[in-house]
Image (cartoon, coloured by chain):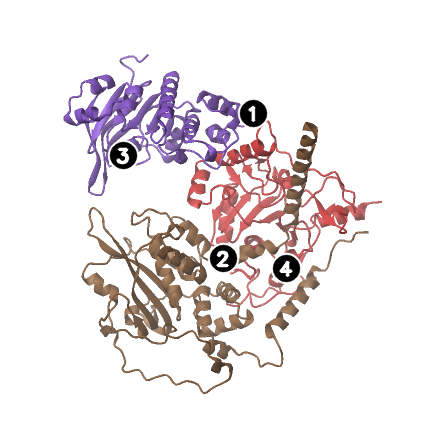
Amino acid sequence: MIAPDDPPILRVTALAKHYGARAAAIDVSFELWPGEVLAVVGESGSGKTTLLDCVSARQRPDAGRVEFLTRHEGMVDIFALSEAQRRLLARTDWGFVHQNATEGLRMNMSAGANVGERLMALGERNYGRIRQEANDWLARVEMDVARIDETPVTFSGGMRQRLQIARNLVTRPRRVFMDEPTSGLDVSVQARLLDLLRSLTRQLSQAAIIVTHDLAVARLMAHRMIVMKDGRVIEHGLTDQVLDDPQHPYTQLLVSSVLTP
Amino acid sequence: MYVAVKGGERAIENSLALLASQRRGDPQVPELTLQQIREQMRLAVDRVMTEGSVYDEDLAALALKQAAGDTLEAVFLLRAYRATLPRLGYTQAIDTAQMQLARRVSATFKDLPGGQLLGPTYDYTQRLLDFSLAAAAEPPVAPESPMEVEAAAVPRVMDLLAAEGLIEVCQPREGDPAPADLTRDPLHFPADRPTRLQNLARGDEGFLLALGYSTQRGYAHSHPFAAEIRFGRVEIEIEPDELGFAVSIGDIDVTECQMVNQFAGSATELPRFTRGYGLCFGHCERKAMAMALVDRALCAAELGEDVVAPAQMPEFVLSHSDSLEASGFVAHLKLPHYVDFQAELELLRRMRSRDIATAAEAA
Amino acid sequence: MNAPDRSALAPAAYASTWETNFNFAYLDERSKRMIRRAILKAVAIPGYQVPFGSREMPLPYGWGTGGIQVTASIIGPDDVLKVIDQGADDTVNAVNIRRFFQRTTGVRTTESTAAATVIQTRHRIPEVPLSAHQILVYQVPVPEPLQRLEPREVETRRMHGLSEYGLMHVKFYEDIARYGHIVTTYDYPVMVDGRYLMSPSPIPAFDNPKMHMNPALQLFGAGREKRIYAVPPHTAVESLAFDDYPFAPQRWDAVCAICAAADSFLDEVITDDRGGRMHVCSDTDYCRTRQAAAP
């Protein structure tokens, strides 16, 4: 359980990013605690992907700070670290699940190699152990372990996402980011994948940020959510509160636009 | 009893003798002179000088004779010779605006100051084999030039566009640092534009032509226009330390191509045309044009364009443009590789016998 | 540029002459100095690829110009040079390179590994262990061990700088998953001094153990790719492997048909068109020495 005095695992302060004259993100601030799932919701062009890229160090913001609670050195400004330190964190303590699985996987390598790569990068030198660990993770993400030696080229979209999740979680990162992880998948596949993600993040007590345009995903996955429009955070709070009692007119519009069966 | 193969040294000597004889051909036929090659195989000489990075028509002719007409082999000879030459200094940058023009055309304007000067070109010939060339004939007479063209009367098209602020400005970097010298230092990535241009100038014409062509067929299109192609004579000047001013040491022929390409703008800059640049020794228009197309393509990352095609990838283009490196490495496959092949053979036999055994067990 | 008069330096006993149009060992002194600086840096950082301004040589890129430039920069009039290709002194390329040095230096050449002070080699390490006063110069086609997995130099430079070699291990994992063992048989990557991943050049994996803690200086020259690297004497060189799939170089069931050696790399020679074959030592000097010593 989180104690009231525990520091957040991630703190974003006054983050801003421009592309030419266009402001993609303006004055974004929030905190994230261990074990929490935060949804960043907005339509395309709202700035949510830019925010994710800056907070995950894939892009450098033009203003503001992103601080991460490391295992041994307390809160550090991730952009003050050397590239070597950032890359080490990216391989061990950070996870990033791409919307398009082909970007997050080595498509020409077997499922087992994809899951084992991080372990090998960190010095694991026993083939048997690597294979066993890969096997375990494939099972944990509910994939057929008999396909451990196949490449993701033959996998369905849902399977590729499961593999991507396994590849990221094998080092038990304390912070995971997901960019529309279920978009483009069949509805039934989406539901099962979200269930899996939810139980995994809970089991591993991970802090997760999930970017989505789909309010149902936010409802299912997140404890808290922020709503973005034109680069700004226009509403934030507990997921149920925001979705059941939206304050901002734009949020109200979003909520009311959700198609109900 | 097996006796190991010997006699490599004698085999090589015989090979060289055979080669010399093949190069000379039928001894009844008069031997080619360097002057004949220099005068009548002019364009081959120009290409060899450009890719060999040495402006010396007689040396290039000699290299072509020694190489029996193989341009890559001739380029190799020139480059190897160049590597032994002492470096005396660097010339001033040549000023193509002062070029004594033999040819000057622009596709961007119907008419412009200085006009369209067609000069000697294959562009308007009809490609019909001329059998009259099979026999010696009276040498053709070149037409008189209407007038001596003043350089000032033929301003560069790029300068005209720049005067209106329509073309990107290419300024030297702060402090005007000396460009890298690829004949001395290895290529580093990321490579700046001066380094890239140097690499392209020495690069193989066929390779650059194919890459340039690919940009016209959708592999990173940049809407190019040939703003200006110039061919003619420029002066070479050096500034010896003792003198403190520049003196002319001679002149050379060069071909220059400037392409105008798709405009680009940014948050702080108005949109402007971008440019591609090509330059070579002698009359090598095809090479200069291809070089300009590839130069522009390689600026993609700097201009914020998506890099999607091989012509836009500096590592791909610059690492494979040198004909010496390419032909050397491809040809090296002719060298003995039997030790490594042996290792592969053993492995393959082992794997096959194991698979056959497993299949037999399973059956 | 006039070549200095070398006749006073070379003992009259040396039979061969050299071209007087070129500097000793062909390269000008400035180029040699540039290459030696690169060599010194390489020795100071074992296994690290030092970029250098490779010169156009009279032999083509890809045919040993890197090894030749290294040898040309370190060779002196008192050196004794051996040149081998595939382990043999008499293959055409070795003959050609040896002739080049005879013409441009006049140094004594030998086919005996023990008698040489500088040995330039392509694709083999001599069977006879080397000693502290010897230098082994390897000809390297592709200095970057990761190139076939990641062709971009900007990326591989970063991987070396950050010691991120997971990609190589992933390749070996795939081999074992697919074939049951690692299928790299030559140019087998090694870790030098526990820090840099290095390509040992296309020597067979069989030769890799010879690099470890070798008392000789090992220099590697890649002319076309313009890199020099080194393994100083007595440096740890370990072939990559997994703990449970250790490095296991190949063995033959046969022995050398000429000298009966059971511990050397054997060439397979096809003797007839009915599948007849025999095995002989790849290292011709080793084989000849054993033959001469046999009772």
Chain C, hue in figure: red
First in residue order: circle 3 vs circle 1? 3
Q: Which chain contains the residue that carries disc 4?
A: C
Amino acid on which disc 2 is placed: Ser
Q: CB under 8 Å between callouts 4 and 2?
A: no
Give the residue pinned by disc 1: A128
Identify the residue at horizontal 55%, vertical 27% (top origin): A127
Label 2 or label 3, whichever lies nearer to me, is: 3
Establish if B212 lies above or below B152: above
Give the residue pinned by disc 2: C31
Label 2 or label 1, whichever lies nearer to me, is: 1
Quadrant for the C terminus of chain B in the image: top right
Amino acid on which disc 4 is placed: Asn
Q: Residues within 10 Å of mark 2 (few under 14, many from 20)?
A: some
Q: Residue C216: name its quadrant.
A: top right
Residue B41 in sight here: yes
Q: CB under 8 Å between callouts 3 and 4?
A: no
Residues at marks 3 and 1, common chain? yes
Give the residue pinned by disc 4: C96
Label 4 or label 2, whichever lies nearer to me, is: 4
Label 3 or label 4, whichever lies nearer to me, is: 3
